[in-house]
Image (cartoon, rainbow, N blue to C red):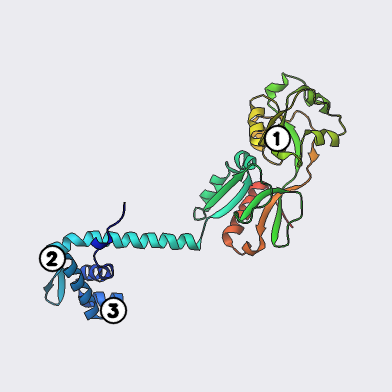
Amino acid sequence: MAIDLRKLPPLKALKGFEAAARLHSIRGAADELNLTHPAISHQIHTLEDDLGVKLFARQGRNVVLTAAGEAFYPGVRAALELLISTAETVKEQSANPALRLQAYITLSIRWLASRLSDFRNQYPEIEIHLQANNSAWEFDEANADIGLIYSRTQMPAHLHWIELFPSKVYPVCSPGLLNNADTPLAVEQLENYPLLTVSTEKGYWGWEAWFKTLGAANQMRQSPLVVDTLAVALEMAVAGQGIALVNGPVAEDDLTAGRLIRPVTEFTAGNGEWGIAVPKALLNDTRVLTFIDWLRVQAGGATDK
């Protein structure tokens, strides 16, 4: 619905009216607004002409509001306060925009999400916008200030890299899936159980490469069930529907709680690193440094490169 701007009173005159009404003085309003006495008087007369009512009456050397002025003042005051508040909010948001954080969706769900409330409690003045993605592994610097990513290549010269988690690849499953089998199992015994495959991790890590690195022939006796995110695979693993292969800290909380176990003791190193990517130009931003330091604490330490 359009606003009929023709019905607005002279906006410039509202400041003079509000100050004179609050101070009961034309001269006082002029001093506060750094204007001349005649300028404030002109603003008030302009406003009175537009409204068709008298807003002030003389009382000695001061002015007092008429009945019409008393009725008009609260609305003017509230409108000016709202404008000031809105303008200040816009200025603050412009001066301190939200930090944009990029993270793989499984890391966001299974590790980061449960910890972000701690950051908010410690630093309520810093706003974080988390962008979770299930396919983009590279740092999207056009849309993020900080990337919590997995990288297999050296960072470009303009980016700073902080290694955050070891790249450690190992299987996890529900205790109930093993049907009270003695653990740890031999690596070859894993093939007797459903192995969950994540399509978006192809080329980064997977069952075939994992078995090969450990010197075990992977016969894949059961048809693999393929899902598109490790988050889904982990949910299925917790539900006892298969064994998921994880890399990094995404199963830590479930392992600690006993929802998942490691059926074998063997693990392999991944072909990359989990870490923080950030443009070097942002390393003088205290909000960026605060969030990076917090991430390091959550991860138990990290190494700059």
Residue farthest to the right, as pictured: 215
Tell me the kind of residue under disc 1. Answer: Val
Camera-near label (1 vs 3) is 1
- Is there a contact, CB below 8 Å, between mark 2 and mark 3? no
Q: Residue 37 in the image: x percent, y percent?
A: 23, 80
Image side of residue 29 versus residue 244, left or right: left
Considering the numbered disc 1 on the image, is that residue within a helix, a strand or a loop? strand
Q: Residue 131 in the image: x percent, y percent?
A: 58, 47
Q: Is residue 303 above or below residue 224?
A: below
Q: Which mark is first along the chain, 2 or 1? A: 2
Camera-near label (1 vs 2) is 1
Considering the numbered disc 2 on the image, is that residue within a helix, a strand or a loop? loop
Q: Is residue 59 above or below residue 272?
A: below
Tell me the kind of residue under disc 2. Answer: Thr
Considering the numbered disc 3 on the image, is that residue within a helix, a strand or a loop? loop
Residue under numbered circle 3: 35
Give the residue displayed 61% in from the left and 65% down from the top: 284
User: Crowding at label 3, few (<14), some or many (≥20) Cα neighbours within 10 Å?
Assistant: some
Give the residue displayed 81% in from the left and 36% down from the top: 209
Residue under numbered circle 2: 66
Q: Which mark is first along the chain, 3 or 2? A: 3
Quarter-wise, where is residue 291 in the image?
Answer: bottom right
Query: Does residue 85 appear anywhere in the picture?
Result: yes
Tell me the kind of residue under disc 3. Answer: Leu
Give the residue displayed 59% in from the left and 57% down from the top: 290
Quarter-wise, where is residue 159 in the image?
Answer: bottom right
Question: Mark on residue 198?
Answer: 1
